[in-house]
Amino acid sequence: MNQAEVRRFAERYFAAFSSHVLESHPAYFTVKLPEEVDKDIGNRPFYWTWIEKMNIPPQPLVITFTFDPEQKPEGLRSEYLHFGSGRLQQIFQSTRRHGRFVCLYEQMEEPSQRRGAKRRSTVPLTPWLNLNLKISFICDKKRDVLLYLGINLYHPQVVHDFYLFARSLRLGPSIPDYAYTLERRLGIEKASELAEREVSKIIAQQDDGWAEEARTRLAEEIEILTSYYDRIADQTAGGEPDNSCDPKPTLESETAASRTAEKDVLLTIDEHTARGGRILDFLRVHTIPETPREEIDQSSWKQSTPAEEKERRIAELKWQYEPRIEISLINGGLFYLYTQPASAGSHTDGRNM
């Protein structure tokens, strides 16, 4: 997202909550956060807990968002909002939380404006359940297929690319005049079953060569790993394990360094570092108590054997390479439409990401 897209998204987000924009400038805008938005992106959880316990009116946050770091407002504390910033990620999460499911009605022309329609005639609106799904084919690589399913809840029917069709319509949150909604003959659970069958059909029609290739790569990686640990087992079978990496000298040297730092107890941290001392040694003497090595109970500590390491590494390889399919719901909604989508006898495979 470029900065123009970030600003448009932020403006649409605050407009959806009827936020009060105090000042709008080409490079920034100042907005007073509504209560819902403040709880989501204001980073004041303890404040809201106190407000709700004391039952007192809250004081909303006022934030200035700037979109051009070269044109910050004078005399105002502003926050640079850009793609990847923490605040924008909070806005994305709030959008998903509040806008994942919608209920919209098709807004039609007045009866007098509809060609061939009688004055004040009512029209039926058909209920449609829209489910935007993502099918992920995962191994050490990943491929996503997007499905925009529409399920007719009056006459059971499943169509594809429903979301793209709905975007071409004029939709609103309230039912228009001279319109009524048809009864939902199909419940949400039955509609979900239809969607599951459609998704299973899509998956069955996919080429499963990617899974076979992933299993082949997994077998090759396990073979390489097995030969590596077999060589280690052959080397250690004829002699004692190599103790060249024993951490004892390092611990003793750190203990000696801490004893040296004890002589400089009265020094400040700046004086200590100026003499070449380490900050960690200074903190050990002044703030962090250190347990002597002989007082540490190491009876329960156990070094991993090569066989255990091999088993753990193989489990990691299987997690990375073994093929699997994950299905997730992106968002959805209930739409009451006068215009009906074309019946799709064949499906589209979606889009690869």
Image (tube, grey):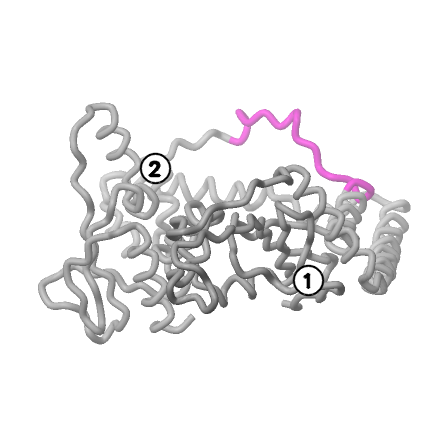
Q: Position of residue 185 (x, y in %)?
A: 63, 39
Residue picked out by circle 1: 343
Q: Residue at x 22, y 67 (%)?
A: 28
Residue under the image location 52 percent in, 41 percent down: 252
Give me the residue at 58% from left, 49% from top: 129
Instruction: Compare residues 347 and 287 and report the one nearer the observer.
Output: 347
259 to the left or right of 324: left
Q: CA distance from mark 2 to mark 1?
A: 77 Å
Q: Which residue is mark 2?
A: 285
> In what element is the residue under mark 2?
helix
Of mark 2 and mark 1, the one earlier in the sequence is 2
Q: Residue 65, position in %: x, y?
A: 24, 62
| Residue 276 horizontal/vertical position (percent) | 34, 56
Residue 308 on image: x %, y %: 78, 40
Q: Is residue 215 visible?
A: yes
Could you tell me which residue is drawn at 73 percent across and 39 percent down? 304
Discs 2, 1 touching: Cβ within 8 Å: no
Residue 307 found in image quarter: top right
Few, some or many residues within 10 Å of mark 2 (<14, 14–19, 20+): some
Range of residues picked out in magenta:
293-308
Name the image quarter holding the C terminus: bottom right
| Direction from residue 254 to residue 72 in the image, left or right | left
70 shown above or below 76: below
